[in-house]
Image (cartoon, rainbow, N blue to C red):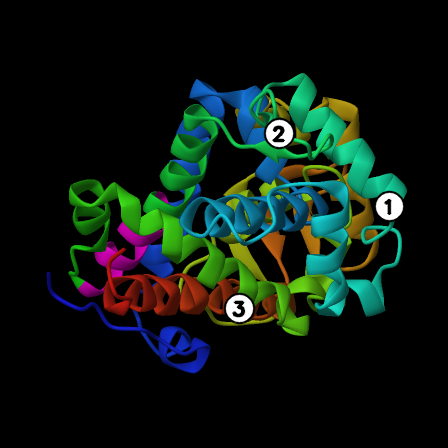
Amino acid sequence: MSLFKAYVPEELLAQPRFHECLTTSVESLLATHREIPREVRYLADLRKWLLSQAIFVLHFEHKGDPACPPISPSALLRLLSGTVIASRNTVIASRNTVIAFLGELGYYRLIEPAAAGDRRRKAFVAPPHSEDLIRRWYGTHLHALDVMDGGARAAALDASPHLIDRAQPAMARLLLADAGWYDPPCSVGLFTRAESGSNVIHDLVSRAPWRWGGERVPVGPVSSNGISGRYLISQSHTARILARARDAGLIGWDRPGNRGDCWVSPHLVEDYRRWQALKFAAVSKSFRMAQQAPAG
């Protein structure tokens, strides 16, 4: 199996086709939302994304080595305590938040209690369909990188699905330790702090041309109805997110009343691309690490 290139964020930002990487990932996100909207909502905002990825770290590491702790409130809290999250957001890293989130995932059967007879009363495992979900999410990011540089990472994962067992924990640990990912610039954070706000910023900024002139970046027609329909988000909630971004000077429309074509600020586009480069660098690095790890 060929070893694929691992990038650092600066290399990605220098790639003219990184724009295609970003637009490809958004197109895949939209397709997945249409197919399995309930499941994907757990990866749709930064707080849920962080907790979900941390849960899968525990799952895959325990799967590979039973001496590692399985999914449980205490194990998840210990994992989070060693990351920037614990120092920057005690709410996310609190026991109440962790227990509530595990309960929510359990209700939707994205995790399930460990096998009967296990003395760990609050231990959980991720069933096969949840593994498939995270493999699909990771695979769409590999495909986006492939579109950019002509690689075949996604095909390699399809041929060796077990690579996700090593790749996901490596990727998640890289990003859980990266303050730039967890605590993005204020322009990006205005979106990611809101429920499903990550979908809104993905949708907006993916429309921006790679290069532009002037102080406004044109992104074409944008409406709260259109975005809410594509991602199955409340129209009123989407409108509030867009209004906050407009009031902050991050987006605007050619005509009053949010009519005409929309524009976004260059500041928002640049901040978003740097933020996304952190994620795609971690994906590329973690996949190479998974390829190089000894089998067994």
Q: Secondary structure at mark 1?
A: helix
Estimate the spatial distance between the alpha carbons at disc 2 and disc 1, rounded to whole Å.
22 Å
Comparing 130 with 7, the one in front is 130
Q: Which mark is residue 160?
A: none
Comparing 127 with 295, the one in front is 295
Magenta stretch prevailing secondary structure: helix
Q: Residue at x 41, y 75 (%)?
A: 13
Q: Residues within 10 Å of mark 3 (few under 14, many from 20)?
A: some
Q: Which three-letter amino acid code belongs to the residue tagged 1?
A: Arg
Q: Which mark is residue 174?
A: 3
Q: Are marks 2 and 3 in contact (CB under 8 Å)?
A: no
Q: Is residue 195 magenta?
A: no
Q: Secondary structure at mark 2?
A: loop
Magenta stretch: give its range. Answer: 140-149
Q: Earlier in the sequence, mark 3 or mark 1?
A: 1
The reply, left or right, for residue 162 in relation to residue 92 is left
Q: Which residue is mark 1?
A: 95
Q: Is residue 32 above or below residue 274?
A: above
Q: Which three-letter amino acid code belongs to the residue tagged 3?
A: Leu
Q: Is residue 269 visible?
A: no
Instruction: Tell me which corner region of the image, top left, top right, bottom left or bottom right, holds residue 110.
Output: top right
Q: Is residue 45 above or below residue 5?
A: above
Q: Which mark is residue 118?
A: 2
Estimate the spatial distance between the alpha carbons at disc 2 and disc 3, rounded to whole Å.
31 Å
How many tags in the picture?
3
Q: Quadrant of the N terminus?
A: bottom left
Q: Residue at x 68, y 32 (%)?
A: 119
